[in-house]
Image (spheres, rainbow, N blue to C red):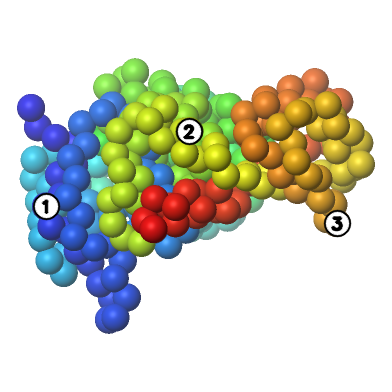
Protein backbone atom coordinates (compact mmCIF):
# COMPACT_ATOMS: atom_id res chain seq x y z
CA UNK A 1 0.00 0.00 0.00
CA UNK A 2 1.35 3.44 -0.97
CA UNK A 3 1.64 5.77 1.98
CA UNK A 4 0.22 9.28 1.70
CA UNK A 5 3.39 10.70 3.26
CA UNK A 6 6.64 9.01 4.24
CA UNK A 7 9.56 10.80 5.86
CA UNK A 8 12.89 9.18 6.68
CA UNK A 9 15.42 11.09 8.74
CA UNK A 10 13.89 14.31 7.40
CA UNK A 11 15.49 17.56 8.56
CA UNK A 12 15.23 21.15 7.44
CA UNK A 13 17.18 24.03 8.88
CA UNK A 14 17.47 27.70 8.06
CA UNK A 15 20.86 28.89 9.23
CA UNK A 16 21.00 27.92 12.89
CA UNK A 17 17.23 27.43 13.16
CA UNK A 18 16.14 23.79 12.97
CA UNK A 19 12.55 23.73 11.70
CA UNK A 20 12.23 19.96 11.18
CA UNK A 21 14.54 17.63 13.06
CA UNK A 22 15.23 14.02 12.02
CA UNK A 23 11.58 13.23 11.34
CA UNK A 24 10.50 9.64 10.67
CA UNK A 25 6.85 9.46 9.73
CA UNK A 26 4.28 7.39 7.82
CA UNK A 27 0.75 8.68 7.18
CA UNK A 28 -2.02 6.63 5.55
CA UNK A 29 -5.30 7.79 7.15
CA UNK A 30 -8.03 9.39 5.02
CA UNK A 31 -8.05 12.45 7.33
CA UNK A 32 -4.97 13.18 9.45
CA UNK A 33 -4.57 15.93 11.99
CA UNK A 34 -1.13 17.56 12.06
CA UNK A 35 -1.07 19.00 15.55
CA UNK A 36 1.40 21.19 17.39
CA UNK A 37 1.91 24.68 18.81
CA UNK A 38 3.00 27.56 16.61
CA UNK A 39 6.62 27.02 15.61
CA UNK A 40 6.38 23.22 15.89
CA UNK A 41 7.38 22.73 12.24
CA UNK A 42 3.95 21.90 10.79
CA UNK A 43 4.03 24.46 7.98
CA UNK A 44 7.64 23.60 7.14
CA UNK A 45 6.71 19.91 6.85
CA UNK A 46 3.85 20.81 4.52
CA UNK A 47 6.15 22.90 2.32
CA UNK A 48 8.66 20.06 2.20
CA UNK A 49 5.83 17.75 1.10
CA UNK A 50 4.89 20.27 -1.59
CA UNK A 51 8.44 20.45 -2.89
CA UNK A 52 8.69 24.14 -1.98
CA UNK A 53 11.63 23.44 0.33
CA UNK A 54 14.60 21.16 -0.30
CA UNK A 55 15.36 18.84 2.65
CA UNK A 56 18.61 19.65 4.44
CA UNK A 57 18.88 15.95 5.20
CA UNK A 58 16.76 12.84 4.71
CA UNK A 59 13.94 12.01 2.32
CA UNK A 60 10.24 12.79 2.01
CA UNK A 61 7.84 10.99 -0.33
CA UNK A 62 4.29 12.00 -1.15
CA UNK A 63 2.03 9.33 -2.68
CA UNK A 64 5.19 7.28 -3.15
CA UNK A 65 7.10 9.98 -5.07
CA UNK A 66 9.65 12.66 -4.22
CA UNK A 67 7.89 16.01 -4.61
CA UNK A 68 10.73 18.34 -5.60
CA UNK A 69 10.26 19.53 -9.23
CA UNK A 70 7.72 16.75 -9.79
CA UNK A 71 4.96 18.54 -11.71
CA UNK A 72 3.01 15.35 -12.41
CA UNK A 73 2.86 14.62 -8.66
CA UNK A 74 2.02 18.19 -7.65
CA UNK A 75 -1.00 18.14 -9.95
CA UNK A 76 -2.31 15.39 -7.67
CA UNK A 77 -1.80 17.55 -4.55
CA UNK A 78 -3.84 20.58 -3.43
CA UNK A 79 -2.74 23.20 -0.91
CA UNK A 80 -4.73 25.75 1.07
CA UNK A 81 -2.30 28.08 2.90
CA UNK A 82 -3.07 29.71 6.23
CA UNK A 83 -2.60 33.26 4.97
CA UNK A 84 -4.68 34.97 2.28
CA UNK A 85 -3.15 36.19 -0.98
CA UNK A 86 -6.06 37.60 -2.97
CA UNK A 87 -6.67 40.36 -5.46
CA UNK A 88 -9.51 41.69 -3.34
CA UNK A 89 -11.50 43.28 -6.18
CA UNK A 90 -11.69 40.05 -8.20
CA UNK A 91 -14.53 37.60 -7.74
CA UNK A 92 -14.07 34.17 -6.22
CA UNK A 93 -14.78 32.59 -9.59
CA UNK A 94 -12.15 34.75 -11.32
CA UNK A 95 -9.60 33.85 -8.66
CA UNK A 96 -10.11 30.13 -9.21
CA UNK A 97 -10.49 30.42 -12.99
CA UNK A 98 -7.24 32.28 -13.57
CA UNK A 99 -5.29 29.92 -11.36
CA UNK A 100 -6.66 27.11 -13.51
CA UNK A 101 -5.46 28.93 -16.62
CA UNK A 102 -2.05 29.25 -14.95
CA UNK A 103 -2.04 25.44 -14.66
CA UNK A 104 -2.46 25.33 -18.45
CA UNK A 105 -6.16 24.48 -18.67
CA UNK A 106 -8.15 25.62 -21.69
CA UNK A 107 -10.73 28.37 -21.15
CA UNK A 108 -13.58 25.87 -21.24
CA UNK A 109 -11.90 23.38 -18.91
CA UNK A 110 -10.81 26.14 -16.51
CA UNK A 111 -14.37 27.46 -16.33
CA UNK A 112 -15.89 24.02 -15.81
CA UNK A 113 -13.39 23.10 -13.08
CA UNK A 114 -13.85 26.45 -11.32
CA UNK A 115 -17.63 26.03 -11.30
CA UNK A 116 -17.36 22.44 -10.04
CA UNK A 117 -14.94 23.42 -7.25
CA UNK A 118 -17.17 26.31 -6.16
CA UNK A 119 -20.14 23.96 -6.07
CA UNK A 120 -18.27 21.41 -3.95
CA UNK A 121 -17.22 24.11 -1.47
CA UNK A 122 -20.74 25.62 -1.36
CA UNK A 123 -19.63 28.87 -2.97
CA UNK A 124 -21.83 28.80 -6.09
CA UNK A 125 -24.22 31.48 -4.82
CA UNK A 126 -21.38 33.91 -4.05
CA UNK A 127 -18.71 32.98 -6.58
CA UNK A 128 -19.40 36.03 -8.77
CA UNK A 129 -19.17 38.48 -5.85
CA UNK A 130 -15.92 40.37 -5.10
CA UNK A 131 -13.66 38.62 -2.60
CA UNK A 132 -13.51 41.74 -0.41
CA UNK A 133 -17.21 41.15 0.42
CA UNK A 134 -16.57 37.61 1.70
CA UNK A 135 -16.68 36.51 5.32
CA UNK A 136 -13.66 34.72 6.79
CA UNK A 137 -15.37 31.37 6.19
CA UNK A 138 -16.07 32.19 2.55
CA UNK A 139 -12.47 33.25 2.00
CA UNK A 140 -11.33 29.92 3.40
CA UNK A 141 -13.74 27.99 1.18
CA UNK A 142 -12.68 29.80 -2.00
CA UNK A 143 -9.04 29.03 -1.13
CA UNK A 144 -10.00 25.37 -0.84
CA UNK A 145 -11.87 25.62 -4.16
CA UNK A 146 -8.69 26.66 -5.96
CA UNK A 147 -6.88 23.69 -4.42
CA UNK A 148 -9.49 21.25 -5.76
CA UNK A 149 -9.55 22.17 -9.44
CA UNK A 150 -6.87 19.66 -10.48
CA UNK A 151 -8.90 16.86 -8.83
CA UNK A 152 -6.18 16.12 -6.24
CA UNK A 153 -5.69 12.84 -4.44
CA UNK A 154 -4.24 14.70 -1.45
CA UNK A 155 -5.15 18.06 0.08
CA UNK A 156 -3.17 20.04 2.66
CA UNK A 157 -5.15 22.51 4.80
CA UNK A 158 -2.96 24.80 6.92
CA UNK A 159 -4.94 26.07 9.96
CA UNK A 160 -8.27 26.15 8.04
CA UNK A 161 -10.37 26.97 11.13
CA UNK A 162 -8.28 29.97 12.18
CA UNK A 163 -10.48 32.96 13.01
CA UNK A 164 -13.78 31.29 12.07
CA UNK A 165 -16.91 31.79 14.17
CA UNK A 166 -18.79 28.70 15.45
CA UNK A 167 -21.01 28.50 12.35
CA UNK A 168 -17.98 28.82 10.07
CA UNK A 169 -16.17 26.08 11.97
CA UNK A 170 -19.14 23.72 11.67
CA UNK A 171 -19.25 24.38 7.92
CA UNK A 172 -15.52 23.71 7.63
CA UNK A 173 -15.78 20.43 9.57
CA UNK A 174 -18.57 19.30 7.25
CA UNK A 175 -16.63 20.32 4.13
CA UNK A 176 -13.53 18.37 5.22
CA UNK A 177 -15.64 15.27 5.82
CA UNK A 178 -17.28 15.73 2.40
CA UNK A 179 -13.88 15.95 0.69
CA UNK A 180 -12.72 12.78 2.42
CA UNK A 181 -15.95 11.03 1.38
CA UNK A 182 -15.08 11.99 -2.21
CA UNK A 183 -11.87 9.98 -1.89
CA UNK A 184 -9.45 12.84 -1.18
CA UNK A 185 -6.86 12.30 1.55
CA UNK A 186 -6.84 15.41 3.76
CA UNK A 187 -4.08 16.56 6.10
CA UNK A 188 -5.26 19.30 8.44
CA UNK A 189 -2.75 21.41 10.35
CA UNK A 190 -3.93 22.90 13.64
CA UNK A 191 -2.72 23.87 17.10
CA UNK A 192 -6.07 23.04 18.74
CA UNK A 193 -6.90 19.44 19.62
CA UNK A 194 -10.64 20.08 19.76
CA UNK A 195 -10.66 21.06 16.08
CA UNK A 196 -8.86 17.90 15.04
CA UNK A 197 -11.00 15.70 17.24
CA UNK A 198 -14.14 16.87 15.42
CA UNK A 199 -12.94 15.49 12.07
CA UNK A 200 -10.58 12.57 12.68
CA UNK A 201 -9.18 10.15 15.23
CA UNK A 202 -5.77 10.04 13.54
CA UNK A 203 -3.24 12.60 14.73
CA UNK A 204 0.43 13.43 14.34
CA UNK A 205 1.95 15.49 17.17
CA UNK A 206 4.94 17.72 16.40
CA UNK A 207 7.01 19.75 18.80
CA UNK A 208 10.14 21.77 18.01
CA UNK A 209 10.43 20.14 14.61
CA UNK A 210 10.31 16.57 15.89
CA UNK A 211 7.66 13.86 15.93
CA UNK A 212 6.43 13.63 19.49
CA UNK A 213 3.64 11.10 19.03
CA UNK A 214 1.40 9.56 16.40
CA UNK A 215 -1.82 7.64 16.82
CA UNK A 216 -5.39 8.08 17.95
CA UNK A 217 -6.68 11.25 19.56
CA UNK A 218 -8.08 9.36 22.53
CA UNK A 219 -4.58 8.08 23.35
CA UNK A 220 -3.30 11.59 24.06
CA UNK A 221 -6.50 13.26 25.20
CA UNK A 222 -6.13 12.39 28.87
CA UNK A 223 -2.69 13.98 28.96
CA UNK A 224 -3.93 17.19 27.42
CA UNK A 225 -6.96 17.41 29.70
CA UNK A 226 -4.72 17.43 32.78
CA UNK A 227 -3.71 20.96 31.87
CA UNK A 228 -5.84 24.13 31.93
CA UNK A 229 -7.32 25.44 28.71
CA UNK A 230 -7.80 29.10 27.88
CA UNK A 231 -10.62 29.94 25.45
CA UNK A 232 -10.90 33.55 24.27
CA UNK A 233 -14.39 34.60 23.22
CA UNK A 234 -14.75 37.78 21.16
CA UNK A 235 -18.05 39.46 21.99
CA UNK A 236 -19.55 42.93 22.30
CA UNK A 237 -21.30 41.84 25.51
CA UNK A 238 -18.80 39.84 27.60
CA UNK A 239 -20.86 40.17 30.79
CA UNK A 240 -23.87 38.41 29.29
CA UNK A 241 -21.74 35.66 27.75
CA UNK A 242 -19.87 35.12 31.02
CA UNK A 243 -23.10 34.40 32.92
CA UNK A 244 -23.64 31.28 30.81
CA UNK A 245 -20.42 29.77 32.21
CA UNK A 246 -21.26 30.23 35.88
CA UNK A 247 -22.94 26.80 36.07
CA UNK A 248 -20.22 24.94 34.13
CA UNK A 249 -18.28 23.01 36.81
CA UNK A 250 -15.15 22.61 34.65
CA UNK A 251 -14.64 26.40 34.45
CA UNK A 252 -12.01 27.60 36.92
CA UNK A 253 -11.78 31.29 36.05
CA UNK A 254 -13.25 33.98 33.80
CA UNK A 255 -11.19 37.02 32.81
CA UNK A 256 -12.54 40.11 31.05
CA UNK A 257 -10.90 42.03 28.22
CA UNK A 258 -12.15 44.79 25.96
CA UNK A 259 -14.88 43.20 23.78
CA UNK A 260 -13.77 39.74 24.88
CA UNK A 261 -13.51 37.33 27.78
CA UNK A 262 -11.11 34.48 28.53
CA UNK A 263 -12.58 31.28 29.97
CA UNK A 264 -10.13 29.03 31.80
CA UNK A 265 -11.36 25.47 32.11
CA UNK A 266 -10.16 21.97 32.94
CA UNK A 267 -12.15 20.53 30.03
CA UNK A 268 -12.92 22.63 26.93
CA UNK A 269 -15.63 20.40 25.46
CA UNK A 270 -18.57 21.63 27.59
CA UNK A 271 -17.46 25.22 26.93
CA UNK A 272 -17.25 24.76 23.17
CA UNK A 273 -20.63 23.01 23.16
CA UNK A 274 -22.17 25.88 25.15
CA UNK A 275 -20.68 28.52 22.86
CA UNK A 276 -21.92 26.70 19.76
CA UNK A 277 -25.40 26.46 21.28
CA UNK A 278 -25.41 30.17 22.15
CA UNK A 279 -24.22 31.14 18.67
CA UNK A 280 -26.87 29.05 16.91
CA UNK A 281 -29.64 30.30 19.20
CA UNK A 282 -28.52 33.92 18.89
CA UNK A 283 -28.84 34.33 22.66
CA UNK A 284 -25.59 36.32 22.88
CA UNK A 285 -23.30 38.08 20.37
CA UNK A 286 -20.30 35.81 19.69
CA UNK A 287 -17.93 37.18 17.06
CA UNK A 288 -15.10 34.68 17.30
CA UNK A 289 -13.48 31.93 19.37
CA UNK A 290 -9.76 31.27 19.69
CA UNK A 291 -7.73 28.95 21.89
CA UNK A 292 -4.18 29.74 22.91
CA UNK A 293 -1.28 27.32 22.69
CA UNK A 294 -1.10 27.10 26.47
CA UNK A 295 -2.66 23.67 26.84
CA UNK A 296 -0.66 22.03 24.05
CA UNK A 297 2.53 23.79 25.06
CA UNK A 298 2.23 22.49 28.61
CA UNK A 299 1.55 18.96 27.41
CA UNK A 300 4.51 18.98 25.03
CA UNK A 301 6.78 20.30 27.75
CA UNK A 302 5.43 17.62 30.08
CA UNK A 303 6.05 14.88 27.50
CA UNK A 304 9.60 16.04 26.72
CA UNK A 305 10.83 16.48 30.27
The residue sitting at 42% across, 23% down in the picture is: 177
Residue 87: % across, % down: 52, 57
First in residue order: circle 3 vs circle 1: 1
Identify the residue position indicated by label 2 in the image.
222
The numbered dot on residue 8 is 1
Real-space Cα distance between discs 2 and 3? 33 Å
Q: Residue furthest bottom?
A: 15
Q: Position of residue 57 (x, y in %)?
A: 12, 66
The answer to whether residue 58 of the structure is visible from this angle is yes
What is the total number of numbered labels drawn onto the structure image? Answer: 3
Quadrant location of the N terminus?
Answer: top left
SS assignment at label 3: loop
Q: From the image, state whether disc 1 or disc 2 is nearer to you.
A: 2
Residue 81 vs 287, above or below: the answer is: below
Few, some or many residues within 10 Å of mark 1 (<14, 14–19, 20+):
some
Question: Residue 98 appears at what percent x and percent y?
Answer: 38, 48
Q: Secondary structure at mark 1?
A: strand
Instruction: Give the left or right position of residue 164, taking residue 115 as reference.
Output: right
- The residue at the point 34 percent across, 29 percent down is 216
Do we see residue 163 in this rendering? no
Q: Looking at the rendering, which quadrant does residue 115 occupy?
A: top left
Task: Sort mark 2 into few (<14), some (14-19) or many (20+) by Cα contacts within 10 Å.
Answer: few
The numbered mark at residue 258 is: 3
Query: Which residue occupies the foreground of this view, 203 or 252?
Result: 252
Q: Kindly report which numbered mark, 3 or 1, lies closer to the viewer in this rendering.
A: 1
Left or right side of 299 for 238: right
Amino acid sequence: MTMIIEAEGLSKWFGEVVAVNNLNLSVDARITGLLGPNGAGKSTLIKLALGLYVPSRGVIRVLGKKPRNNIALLQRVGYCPETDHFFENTTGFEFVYWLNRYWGMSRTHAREQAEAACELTHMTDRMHDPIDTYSKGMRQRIKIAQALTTAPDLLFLDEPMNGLDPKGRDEMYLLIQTLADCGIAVIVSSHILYEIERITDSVVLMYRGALLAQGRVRDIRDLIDRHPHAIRVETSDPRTVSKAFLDVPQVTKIEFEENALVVRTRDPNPCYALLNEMARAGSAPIDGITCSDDNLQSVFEYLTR
